[in-house]
Image: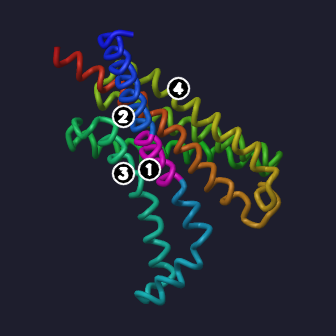
Amino acid sequence: MSLLDAGVVVRRHSGASTRSIAAARRLAIALCAGLLIGAAECLFFLLALNHLHIELALWRAFGLSSAAVGTLAILACVIAPVPAGSAFTWLATGGRAGWPRVVLSGVCLLLASLAGLVVALGLEPLGQSGNVLLIFRMAFTVASGVAALLCTWEVGRLLGLDDAWRMGVLVGAVTAATYLVYALLIDQVPDFHVGGGNMAMPRVALLGNLLAGTAGGAVAFLLLSGSHARRATLGAL
């Protein structure tokens, strides 16, 4: 092998290594961005499962009453999606979207989460006259998918992306599929059988929202960031 050929091989290996590092870095950021969404979506159930400990701690530290703690918990659940969604969009666009769009993206996550909640509450009465476990799986799977679809679509439109609807459908499908697979598997774990008591439903919902939100958020990040980068590149030409 000549020195010239050796140099070409070294450059190829160096280029492949650089691309692998960049891909790994992007995937890590996507998972962190997805975790922001998952954490915001599971906060309600986290507080519901630990409200007694939280009330006691805040009463000892600040003398807050149970009603005051309940009000703060509701405010936290309502407000949390806004900074989470804003941080997500800031990461996805590399801080190039502008603060108005970044903040509005957080509002989009809040509105999409409320839409998912409406879907879940609308299906909940069916559990009173049917299979509780089946209705739970259907309600939370559909609700998570709807919320993910709407949020991705809204943020995509906000960023001026032409394929926002397609990305929303894909993210909604991934999120719903993740929740459904998780719900089927977790039912075999002791204390996680919905309908069996022992606060199983909020336990399952807590982990389900975290996992599905993280998975859907990571996919949304990869799609939105890629589309936004391509749009920015074309705009610069």
Residue in the picture at 46% in, 25% down = 167
Occupied quadrant, residue 165? top left
Q: Which amino acid does label 4 sit on?
A: Leu
Residue in the picture at 44% in, 36% down = 24
Q: Is residue 7 above or below residue 196?
A: above
Disc 3 to disc 1: CB gap under 8 Å:
no
Residues 52 and 23: in front is 23
- Label 2 Cα crowd, 10 Å radius (few <14 / some 14-19 / many 20+): many
Lateral position of residue 207 relative to residue 59, left or right: right
Report the disc number at residue 170. 4
Disc 3 to disc 4: CB gap under 8 Å:
no
Q: Where is residue 56 in the image (x, y as percent from the top left)?
A: 54, 84
Query: Magenta segment, which residues?
Result: 28-41
Give the spatial CA distance, label 2 vs label 3: 13 Å
Report the disc number at residue 36. 1
Residue that numbered label 3 is attached to: 82
Mark closer to the chain start, 4 or 1: 1
Residue that numbered label 2 is attached to: 155
Main secondary structure found in the magenta portion: helix
Mark closer to the chain start, 4 or 2: 2
